[in-house]
Amino acid sequence: MVPAFMHRESNMLFRTHQPALAQGTWRAHWRRWALCLGASTLAMAAMAQGSAPPDAVALPDPKAMQQRLSYAPQRITVVEPHLSVQKPHLETYRGFPATLVWDALLGPNWRKPGVDIEIRALDGFISRIPSQRFIQERAFLTFEREGHAQFTMDNPAQHQTNIPLAPWYLVWDNRDRPALIAEGALMWPYQSAKVRISTERQQALMPAGLPASWQAASQLTFGQCLSCHTARGFGGQKMPIDLTVLARNIPEADFVRWVLAPETLRPNTTMPALQERLPQAQREENARLIHRYLLALPPKP
Ligand code: HEC
């Protein structure tokens, strides 16, 4: 029997969709929804700007990339965040420096301040990484994992095994960078297929009228949640639910419990727990801050 509190808990969280759906059906339902929502969000963004946003460019395959860059792929050894849950785990990949790829595919504008590099993955995950970060730290777009016939990896934090990484997996040279290691895997998009220059972030997350004191919370929410979810239509398409709407339906205590330990409420969920490498008190504070920011943010653009 399901304990009474679990039952209540899942009702809270499931309120926005049908709890009776079988898991498979439910996933298919989400996928279909993701497709519609993805298309309409893009169309809306284009309308809001009065012109189409810069198109995403497909990343060429490794051979074509090598020709385009006139650069032989190099080896890069990193502390692999997906596999370093208990202790640091080194992996070696082969690939190209990201800055060379951006120069070749996006032109010089990607280096401007306030610009994000938007990386779109085949599974709907969207990374938007400040371009300055690529100037300060060394990243590589990789296509091969040394010592492995398949370009795949397990992702214990998301309860998945043998996930395909192809066509491209973005990794960071983090061996001498404790701060990068502490961040976990959110800036390591795999199945990366397309890139574009994105300048929408600040306007979407700090709309006119929202007090500037929310800036830090907006960046926290962006970094931790909006590769998979959206806020006011801005974010990722892996699970394209709008968190500004959802937060208004979930009391803070339930929201915090879900975000800190999703797998205790829904075993095998692919949602990772918030900032597992931080102390528990800090994690709780951050979860509450995210909830309050989502309530402060007006739901509709
Ligand atoms: C890597 C992708 C990913 C990230 C990052 C992520 N989520 Fe999720 N989230 C999911 C998925 C997938 C689900 C659907 C639950 C499942 O897997 O069964 C979900 C479900 C949820 C739900 C419950 C929705 C429901 O209907 O029950 C909430 C609330 C939520 N996420 C909030 C957040 C917040 C807040 C953050 C940031 C702290 C976050 N998520 C980060 C993937 C993600």
Image (cartoon, rainbow, N blue to C red):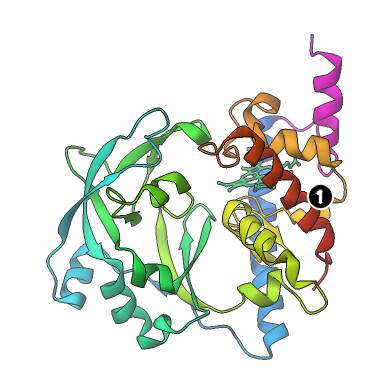
Q: Is residue 50 above or below residue 124?
A: below
Q: Position of residue 257 (x, y in %)?
A: 73, 33
The quadrant where residue 219 appears: bottom right
Give, as a single range, the part of the protein colored magenta. Answer: 1-22
Q: Position of residue 96 (x, y in %)?
A: 23, 64
Secondary-structure class at tag 1? helix
Q: Residue at x 41, y 51 (%)?
A: 179
Image quadrant occupied by the C terminus: bottom right
Q: Nearer the viewer, residue 299 or 172?
A: 172
Residue type of the residue flagged with mark 1? Ala
The quadrant where residue 39 appears: bottom right
Q: Nearer the viewer, residue 171 or 25?
A: 171
* Mark 1 residue crowding within 10 angstroms, few (<14) / some (14–19) / many (20+): some
The quadrant where residue 72 appears: bottom left
Q: Position of residue 161 (x, y in %)?
A: 42, 32
Q: Decide if residue 20 is on the left or right side of residue 38.
A: right
**Residue 167 seen anywhere in this rendered image of the structure:** no
Is label 1's Cβ within 8 Å of ligand 1?
yes
Q: Residue at x 37, y 35 (%)?
A: 83
Image quadrant occupied by the N terminus: top right
Q: Residue at x 30, y 69 (%)?
A: 60
Q: Decide if residue 283 is on the left or right side of residue 79.
A: right
Q: Position of residue 108 (x, y in %)?
A: 36, 87
Q: Is residue 167 above or below residue 72?
A: above
Q: Which residue is mark 1?
A: 247
- Whether the magenta-drawn stretch holds residue 25 is answered as no
**Residue 51 seen anywhere in this rendered image of the structure:** yes
Work out which residue is located at the far top of the displayed protein and give it: 1
Q: Nearer the viewer, residue 95 or 275?
A: 275
